[in-house]
Image: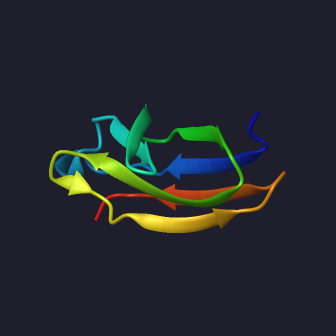
Amino acid sequence: MSDATVRLSRLWTPAVFGGHEEWAIAIDGTVIGSIASNETVEVSLEPGQHSVRLGTGRHRSPERSFQVPPGNVVGFWCHGP
């Protein structure tokens, strides 16, 4: 059972930068869901070292590594370029 969380908040993005599209959420290289503009998503995962990447098509973030201790929440916010 997982006891760590990553919280992703997507700020409004202009339509020219894919603002109306949902962005895929990839944790450790696996797409686990999506996030819409002005939405916050929480993902439960095992404590430890992970990576996250968001985006659709050519609008993708760089992959970011993070460490999440047991029982903690790590948060990221994202926006267009």
Location of residue 33 by image quarter: top left
Counting every numbered tag in the picture gives 0
In this picture, residue 30 sits left or right of residue 68:
left
Residue at 53 percent of width and 58 percent of height: 77
Residue 8 visible from this viewpoint: yes
**Where does residue 39 sit, x and y in percent of width and height?**
52, 38
In this picture, residue 36 sits left or right of residue 7:
left
Residue at 28 percent of width and 35 percent of height: 21
In this picture, residue 39 sits left or right of residue 62:
right
Q: Quadrant of the N terminus?
A: top right
Near-viewer residue (14 or 26): 26
Residue 35 visible from this viewpoint: no
The scheme the figure's colours follow is rainbow
**Where does residue 16 sit, x and y in percent of width and height?**
17, 50
Which residue of the protein is positioned furthest toward the right in this rendering? 71
Residue at 32 percent of width and 58 percent of height: 80
Near-viewer residue (51 or 41): 51
**Where does residue 65 sit, x and y in percent of width and height?**
50, 67
Location of residue 72 by image quarter: bottom right
**Where does residue 66 sit, x and y in percent of width and height?**
58, 66
Image height of 63 relative to 60, above or below:
below
Q: Quadrant of the C terminus?
A: bottom left
